[in-house]
Image (cartoon, rainbow, N blue to C red):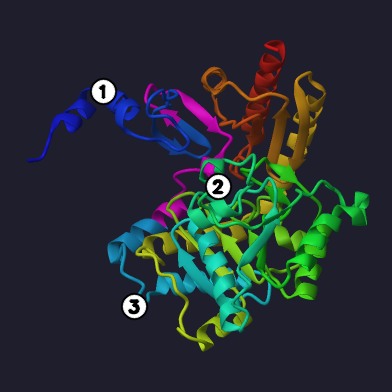
Amino acid sequence: MMRNEFRDKVSTDWLAVDRRHVWHPYASIVDPLPTVPVVAATGVRLILEDGQELIDGMASWWAAIHGYNHPVLNQAIAQQMCQMSHVMFGGLTHKPAVELAALLLDIAPEPLEHVFLVDSGSVAVEVALKMAIQYWQAAGHPKKQKMLTFKGGYHGDTMGAMSICDPVNGMHTLFSHVLAKHYFAPAPTCQRDEDWQDRDIAPFRRLIETHRHELAAVVVEPLVQGAGGMRFYCPEYLRQIRALCDANGVLLILDEIATGFGRLGAMFACEKASIAPDILCLGKALTGGTLSLAATLTTPEVAQTICKKDPGVFMHGPTYMGNPLACAAAKASTELLLASPYGKRVAGIERHFKQTLLPLGEVPGVRDARVQGAIGVIELETAIDMARIQPEFVRRGVWVRPFRNLIYLMPPYIIEPPDLEKLTTAVADIVALSSNAR
C-alpha cells in the first residue's frame, strides 16, 4: 500500500523533508549543512523562498552561461516538447540530434567528425575511455588499456572517470582499491608560455615514453584543472602533449566539459594552443544550464577503426542518449552563444577579476589568487568552514559555493558590471573575514 506520510510532510514543511530525506551532492544525511531554498531564477539571479535575490557567481556549476529563464532557450524547449520529448536513439533518429551534431562539428576543431550524445559529463568521459580502449583493440593492440593523466585533475564521479581523477588528494580516494590503475604525471606548473622550460614536460615525457606500449590515451583538462583544484597552465604544455602523443602512438582525449563553450574566451580551450584532440568531451554549458546533455566527439580514424573490427559497433548506449528536448536546448544555446559577443564579455569579466581578485593574493591567509578568462580563484592556506562561510555569502546577496580551500567565481557571461562588482566585493569581504579568524 502506498504511504502518504512523506508527501503530507512536504505540504507542511518541505525543507524539513529535504534535510531528513533528500541526499545532496557531497553532503551528509546525518549532519547536513543548511540548504538554501530557491523558488525561481532569472537572468543572473536566484530568487529564494523568502523573496531574497542572490547574484549567482557559479552559473549553476558553470553551465548557465546565458543566465536563467532565457526566452530563446525556453522557446526551443517548449516547441520541442509539443512535438516529442523523448524517443529511444537505438534504431531511431530525429532532427534535433542531427542538427546539434552538425552544429558541434562545425565549431569543433578538425579532424573531429563523429558525435556520440550522452546524458552527463561523467558519461562523456566514460565513453571517451571506452572509445580509446576499443580503438586499440580493433587496431590490433589489445594491451593498450591504460591512461596517462595529471595529478590534481577531476573528470567525473562515475567509476571510469574516478579512476583518472587525482588519486591522493581527490574526492574519490575512498574507492581507490576498486578503481582501474592508471599513470599520473605531476600537475603542470608553468602558467605562461613566456616562462616555459623543457623541464616542465620532462616527467610527463618519461611516463609516456616508458609506458607507450600499454597506454591507450592521455586524458587532460586543457589549460584549466577544474574541480580538482582550479589550477591553470600554459598552452605550450598542451602543444607538447599533442606532439608526444603523436610520437608515441597514444590518443589524446581532451576533457572540455568545464572549459568548452567560451569560458576562457575561445570556443574551446584547445584553440588557445592551436591543437586538436583525437577525442573531445563536452558538457555543462552545452545546453546553457537547462537540461542534462553531454557529447563525445571523435575522428574518422577512431570511429572507423572501431567499427571495422569485431563486434563492429561501439559498445555503449544510454537510455536517454540524444534526448530531443536536450538536443533542441543545446542547439539553441550554442546558436545563441555564437550570435553573442561572448569573447568580449569574457574579456570584460577577466579584466574585472584581475583588478579586484588578484590583489587579494597579498592578504594574510591567502596562498594564491589567479584569473583566466571568466574564472577567478582565491586559494586559501586552510580549508574553508562551509557552515560558517556559506551563510555569509548569502547574507551579502550572492551565491558562491567554495570547496576545500578554494573560493572561486565562474558567473554567467551576461553578468553586468554592478553585479560582478557585488560578487567580487563579497569575495573580498569573506577573504578578510577568514584572514581575521586566523
- Residue 28 in the magenta stretch? The answer is no
SS for callout 3: loop
Q: Which residue is drawn at 80% across and 27% down?
A: 361
Splitting the image into 4 quarters, where does residue 47 fall?
top left
- Residue 13, numbered circle: 1
CA–CA distance in space, label 1 to label 3: 44 Å
The count of marks equals 3
Q: Tell me, yes or no, if residue 218 can be seen here.
A: yes
Give the numbered dot on residue 48: none
Badge 3 is on which residue? 92
Determine whether label 1 and label 3 are within 8 Å by CB: no
Along the line of sight, which residue is nearer the eye, 136 or 103?
A: 136
Residue 376 horizontal/vertical position (percent): 70, 37
Residue at the (49%, 63%) spot, across then down: 331
Of residue 204 and residue 2, the one placed in the foreground of this image is 204
Which element is circle 1 on? helix
From the viewer's perspective, tell me whether residue 279 is left or right of residue 63.
right
Residue 143 rendering spot, x and y as whole percentages? 62, 74
**Segment tinted magenta in the rendering:** 47-75
Vertical order, 365 against 121 (above or below):
above
In this figure, which residue is indicated by the disc labeled 2?
Answer: 176
Amino acid type of the residue that numbered disc 2 sits on in the rendered structure: Ser
